[in-house]
């Protein structure tokens, strides 16, 4: 078996503020990828061969938001379920400040404790990919809804950043919320894992990457995403992706 086979489904409506994608997968061998940072967190419930992340092997793991790329490798056949989480889904699922997971990959046992082994065992025993997704969804629904409340202010500010492509001024967010800049930063570190300015840069990078992959020339991407010029775009791409836009596009 070679390549990646996957089945994806949209999460239940109750989960959509917290989960953006659910994917059951089977991975061929060998494969190495550069995973670029994006405005969300990841949960991988895997079995059979482990996945290496920056050289460290993990059967199942969680990863917070970050501002740098990661290298993943699979050396033997692997299966599992991947969950793409919003920052607030990860905050409620893991029950820990997101700043503790920034740019980190953590074994899922350290994040979910006693939940982990029975869930992964059931997923491995279940041959239907659709049923694996339903099992994962039921687990998430219970765990996320029982997690700590986030409040509405930071999700509102995050939504403003996402809707604007990262172009809303942090000072405007603080003023509209009636918060000091320091308080806004502290709340973002807890619920998102990045300061508001860093989160805005990540959102802008993610949008620019999507436009480049869609075929838009870098100079047009820079203008569309609010970079000062193409040199500014290049600097952000080197920081977030480890290389200039032209390399990534190819």
Image (tube, rainbow, N blue to C red):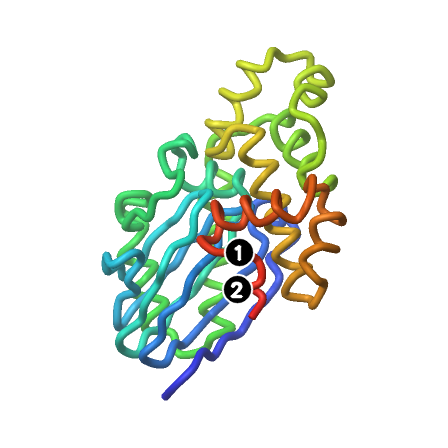
| Res 183 quadrant in image | top right
User: x, y (%) of residue 55?
Assistant: 25, 59
Image marks 2 and 1: residues in contact by CB distance under 8 Å:
yes
User: x, y (%) of residue 149?
Assistant: 53, 29
Quarter the N terminus occupies:
bottom left
**Residue underneath mark 1:** 244
User: x, y (%) of residue 161?
Assistant: 67, 36
Residue 48 in the image: above or below residue 34:
below
Residue 83 in view? yes
Residue 134 in the image: above or below residue 31:
above
Residue 70 in the image: above or below residue 51:
above
Going by the image, does 208 lie left or right of 108? Answer: right
Within 10 Å of the Cα at label 1, are there few (<14), some (14-19), or many (20+) other Cα atoms? Answer: some
Residue in front for this viewpoint, 151 or 41: 41
Within 10 Å of the Cα at label 2, are there few (<14), some (14-19), or many (20+) other Cα atoms? Answer: few
Q: Which mark is residue 247?
A: 2
State the residue at coordinates (59%, 26%): 151
Residue 127 in the image: above or below residue 17:
below
State the residue at coordinates (26%, 66%): 50
User: x, y (%) of residue 195?
Assistant: 51, 28
Q: Label 2 to label 1, Cα distance in Å?
A: 6 Å
Residue in front for this viewpoint, 140 or 86: 86
Element at label 2: helix
| Res 81 quadrant in image | bottom left
Going by the image, does 121 lie left or right of 90? Answer: left
Count of numbered tags: 2
Q: Which mark is residue 224?
A: none
Residue in front for this viewpoint, 120 or 106: 106
Quarter the C terminus occupies:
bottom right
Going by the image, does 222 lie left or right of 131? Answer: right
């Amino acid at each position: 078996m070679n390549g990646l086979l996957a089945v994806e489904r949209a999460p239940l409506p109750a989960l959509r503020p917290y989960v953006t994608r659910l994917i059951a997968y089977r991975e061929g061998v060998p494969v190495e990828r550069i995973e670029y940072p994006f405005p969300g967190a990841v949960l991988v419930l895997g079995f059979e061969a482990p996945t290496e992340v920056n050289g460290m092997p993990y059967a199942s793991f969680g990863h917070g938001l970050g501002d740098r790329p990661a290298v993943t490798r699979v050396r033997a056949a692997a299966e599992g379920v991947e969950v793409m989480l919003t920052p607030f889904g990860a905050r409620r699922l893991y029950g820990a400040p997101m700043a503790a997971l920034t740019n980190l990959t953590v074994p899922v046992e350290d994040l979910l404790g006693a939940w982990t082994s029975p869930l992964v065992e059931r997923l491995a025993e279940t041959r239907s990919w659709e049923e694996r997704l339903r099992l994962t969804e039921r687990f998430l629904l219970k765990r996320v809804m029982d997690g700590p409340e986030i409040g509405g202010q930071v999700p509102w500010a995050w939504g403003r950043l996402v809707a604007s492509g990262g172009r809303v001024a942090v000072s405007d967010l603080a003023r509209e919320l009636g918060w000091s800049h320091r308080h806004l930063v502290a709340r973002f570190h807890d619920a998102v894992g990045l300061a508001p300015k860093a989160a805005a840069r990540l959102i802008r990078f993610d949008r620019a990457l999507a436009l480049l992959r869609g075929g838009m020339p870098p100079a047009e991407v820079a203008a569309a995403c609010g970079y000062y010029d193409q040199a500014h775009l290049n600097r952000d791409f080197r920081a977030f992706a480890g290389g200039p836009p032209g390399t990534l596009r190819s």
